[in-house]
Image (cartoon, grey):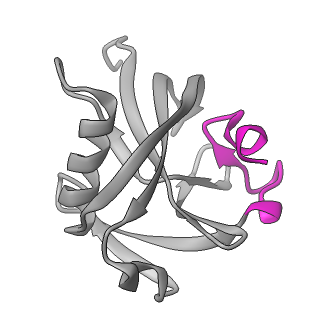
Amino acid sequence: MKSQIIRPIALGIFRKDDTILVFEGYDKNKNQCFYRSPGGGIEFGEPGHVALTREIQEEFNARIMEPHYLGMLESIFWYQGEKGHEIALLYEARFQDTHWYCTPTINGYEDTGEPFTCIWKELNSFNPITPLYPAGLLAMLK
């Protein structure tokens, strides 16, 4: 069993017209695709906006500007059969280089070296079958 720790994360909401940048995940236990905004863990003593800036730099080798705090969501969930608990600090942010907005996909790498791909997805395309996580984020963005 994993350790029972609440994980603080910072997530970036990047908008392009009526779309947001998300990556697609898959939970094999639920047989379900889901979407989440890019970002990652907040280190001890690190402000949330600094964590987001660092995570985007590490994952995409990209710089962001003007991260604006939107709010916080608490997420208690099951993923791959394991219970998780996260406190997500949400920031609206923009890429410094506008070329990131001109490509349909953006490739990134987890700290483990595992690749992942983000896409621009319309806000009205999320639903209970293909949800946007953390729960409550979609309502916050509409």
Question: What x and y, as percent, mark residue 22?
Answer: 54, 61
Is 54 placed left or right of 123 in the picture? left
Image quadrant for the N terminus? top left
Count how many numbered circles sit on residues in the image.
Answer: 0
Residue at 32 percent across and 30 percent down: it is: 48
Q: Which residues are magenta?
A: 123-142
Residue at 60 percent across and 43 percent down: it is: 29
Residue at 83 percent across and 62 percent down: it is: 124
Question: Residue 132, relative to residue 134: is it above or below?
Answer: below
Question: Residue 61, relative to residue 39: is it above or below?
Answer: below
Asked if the magenta segment contains residue 128, the reply would be: yes
Instruction: Return the residue nearer the eye: 15 or 5.
Output: 15
Question: What x and y, as percent, mark residue 39?
Answer: 37, 47
Question: What x and y, as percent, mark residue 137?
Answer: 67, 39
Asked if the magenta segment contains residue 139, the reply would be: yes
Instruction: Return the residue nearer the eye: 55 or 24.
Output: 55
Question: What x and y, as percent, mark residue 85?
Answer: 48, 20
Quadrant of the rendered image containing residue 61: bottom left
Q: Report the residue that reaches farthest toward the top.
A: 4
Q: Report the residue that reaches farthest toward the front.
A: 66
Residue at 78 percent across and 39 percent down: it is: 139
Instruction: Return the residue nearer the eye: 29 or 41.
Output: 41
Is 17 placed left or right of 15 in the picture? right
Instruction: Return the residue nearer the eye: 32 or 100.
Output: 100
